[in-house]
Image: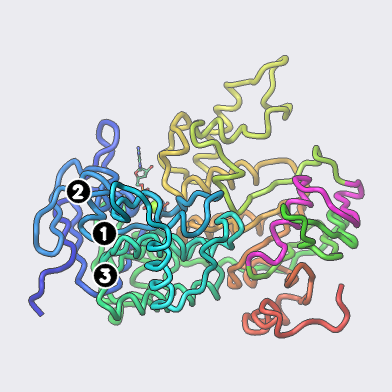
Amino acid sequence: MSQEPAIVMEGITRIFGEDFKANDSIDFRVRKGTIHALVGENGAGKSTLMNILYGLLSPTYGTIRINGLEKNINSPREAISLGIGMVHQHFMLIETLTVLENIILGDESTGPFGRLDLSKAAEKVSALLKSFRISIDLNEKVENLAVGVQQKVEILKVLYRNADILILDEPTAVLTPQETDVLFDTLEELKSIGKTIILISHKLLEVLSVSDYITVLRHGKVTGNLKTSETSKEEISVLITGDEFKDSLQQEFRSAGEIVLEVKGLSVLNDKKFETVKSVSFELRAGEILGIAGVEGNGQSELIEAICGLRQMSSGSIKIDGQSIQNTTPVSLIPSDKLKFAMVKEYDITGNILLGRQNEEQFSKALAINYDRLRRFSEQLIEEYDIRPSDPDIKIGSLSGGNQQKVVAARELSKNASLIVAAHPTRGLDIKASAFVHGTLLKQKTKAVLLVSSDLNELLKLSNRIAVIYNGKITGLFETNETNEKELGMYMTGMRTMNNEL
Ligand SMILES: Nc1ncnc2c1ncn2[C@@H]1O[C@H](COP(=O)(O)OP(=O)(O)OP(=O)(O)O)[C@@H](O)[C@H]1O
Ligand SMILES: [Mg+2]
């Protein structure tokens, strides 16, 4: 048992700017062949610590030992040569390339003179697929894959480089419950052949179910090293937040008002011209939260895009406040893929808060933008949403993932629109930030909320009614207090469907 740990990080400090310690004297040890979870609030320093281990950032102070030997890791290439692989919080695949091309991209060990031997590479990848019982079409373009599958490609990319230590930064944030189960099976399998896995996650129940050890970070420092079998959700929560935080929010009875959103016989095509929304009809009233449950890829994205005027419908109608929608109809949209649709990384927080809102009267002065007012507004939102660091001039690209999502949520929920479309609004947020967004949605008593989520707990907690979308159709519609996770799961996977389709 006196085996050297796979990883020993000692006294790791990373300073950004003058004196901001994103990591502050962190000691972090991971035993070989274990699944070790790293948890903590948004901005606690998790990604920073792992980026240091992967050679993307250098520590200001501290040392790293890999399998007992002290190493300076100055680049991901060096990390890979030490058997360390990382799957990032935001995927880094090239969408227009195939699965195989993405997996082997940048790997020089493939053939003589740096030439790629594609058939050999394909053989090696196929062997990996087989040993982990994963099935993916290697010739499919990545842009056509569901997120869960894209993530498998990221993992394969790491395994292809013979990684013994895998770092997964919030791998389940974008997955459905079913995809998460599949991922955890894969992780167990990897562990059983001796791989070491570091898992960053905000979902404590998942962490408790899959990990062997847990390290908790708070404000850049370690607040706990725990053995999973000897701890509880409550103990971890206290170490994460520093207090006995309890999320006691609950959907209460809300009286439904006027019809805000009316969707009738709506059909929508996806980019490949397949009909992915098939004659869908429903109504949503002011003061109501309607949840849309479904496994990702069953038409929810196209449905949302059509409602927000971002995608044409092929038939049917959509009315907001009794008017047919146009692309100028204001809708608050918190989209699922925040990087692609919702923010400009190079802009500062204030710039991102203005995004798409340039024409609002409150921000304009004569024909120009009223910067003073915008700045004050931005400062107010930063305080209200507890966005950290609280500097309106900081580029959003340097914020932690969760804080980026807070900026998008703050902008959209502060808009003056009668319909809020929230797609996975708490993806990547820590428990406090999630509770805050949930509370804000529940507070919108005069607005209508369409909540799309793959997290059934979230749907059951917030929605008045839940519609299940399967294969482009609404196959079930429930009052939230008359259904449960199990029943919804059966509709989501197509095992059950209503007799009279809506
Ligand atoms: N390149 C950078 N420049 C300046 N500050 C940075 C940079 N990278 C991270 N930070 C800051 O360091 C702190 C820790 O960020 P980090 O990304 O490690 O948090 P995290 O624990 O991964 O959070 P999340 O759960 O939101 O992903 C944050 O306050 C962040 O704004
Ligand atoms: Mg992070």
Quadrant location of the C terminus in the rendered image = bottom right
Mark 2 to mark 1 CA distance (whole Å): 10 Å
Mark 1 to mark 3 CA distance (whole Å): 9 Å
Which residue was labeled with disc 1?
A: 84
Q: Which residues are magenta?
A: 296-324
Residue nearer the viewer, 193 or 323: 193
Specify whether residue 124 is painted magenta.
no
Mark 2 to mark 3 CA distance (whole Å): 18 Å
| Three-letter amino acid code of the residue under disc 3 | Thr
The image quarter containing residue 26 is bottom left
Q: Marks 2 and 3: CB-CB under 8 Å?
A: no
Tell me the residue at 15%/54% (across/down): 64
Is 331 situated left or right of 114 in this image? right
Q: First in sequence: mark 2 or mark 1?
A: 2
Which residue was labeled with disc 3?
A: 196
Q: What is the secondary structure assignment of the residue under circle 1?
A: strand
The disc placed on residue 379 is none
What count of labels does the image hold? Answer: 3
Q: Marks 2 and 1: CB-CB under 8 Å?
A: yes
Is 391 situated left or right of 351 in this image? left
Which residue was labeled with disc 2?
A: 73
Residue nearer the viewer, 309 or 460: 309
| Three-letter amino acid code of the residue under disc 1 | Ile
Note whether 476 is above or below 283 in the view shown: below
Tell me the residue at 49%/55% (across/down): 433
